[in-house]
Image (cartoon, rainbow, N blue to C red):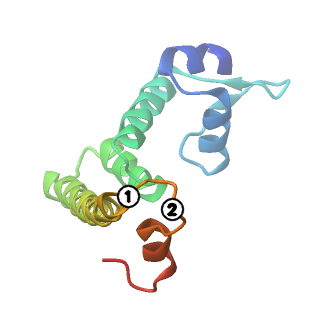
Amino acid sequence: MNIGEVARRSGLPAKTIRYYEEIDLIRPQRSENGYRSFAENDLHKLAFLGRARALGFTIEECRTLLALYEDETRESAEVKRVAEEHLRHIDEKIAELQDMRATLSHLVRACAGDDRPDCPILQGLANETVE
């Protein structure tokens, strides 16, 4: 399979596939003329990586998960550890976003939004600590 075909079938852009090759996440064969030649196994790895990235796993987490995926002697406890750590990061990000939303919501409610120049939103952003 050429890169166009594997891109179409995996749902990943060719640029992403080239990047994954550059950082050694995948290693397609090369023909004599230098063109990439992807096997069905490469397609499965790319689909795996696409789903993992869609769930927000970092490249390094994907590297770890892919290694575990390929290791038939792996322990599922290791896979679970990686996923739990990622879930913890997601929960932290959600908490940060909720705090950001509460702060911005407070500032928006405090602003009259009229033709006067004073604006609690700008005052809040100008302060070191935003409530």
Disc 1 to disc 2: CB gap under 8 Å: yes
Q: Is residue 16 above or below residue 61?
A: above
Which residue is under mark 1? 112
The part of the image, by quadrant, that contains residue 15 is: top right
Q: Which residue appears at 47% of the width and 67% of the height?
A: 119
Does residue 32 appear left or right of residue 114 in this picture? right
Q: Is residue 69 above or below residue 82?
A: above
Quarter holding the N terminus is: top right
The part of the image, by quadrant, that contains residue 98 is: bottom left
Q: Is residue 16 above or below residue 105?
A: above
Q: Which residue appears at 58% of the width and 21% of the height?
A: 7
Separation of residues labelled 1 and 2 (CA atoms): 8 Å
Query: In the rendered image, is residue 2 in sight?
Result: no
Residue sitting at the far left: 77
Disc assigned to residue 116? 2
Disc assigned to residue 6? none
Residue sitting at the far bottom: 128
Q: Position of residue 123 (x, y in %)?
A: 47, 76
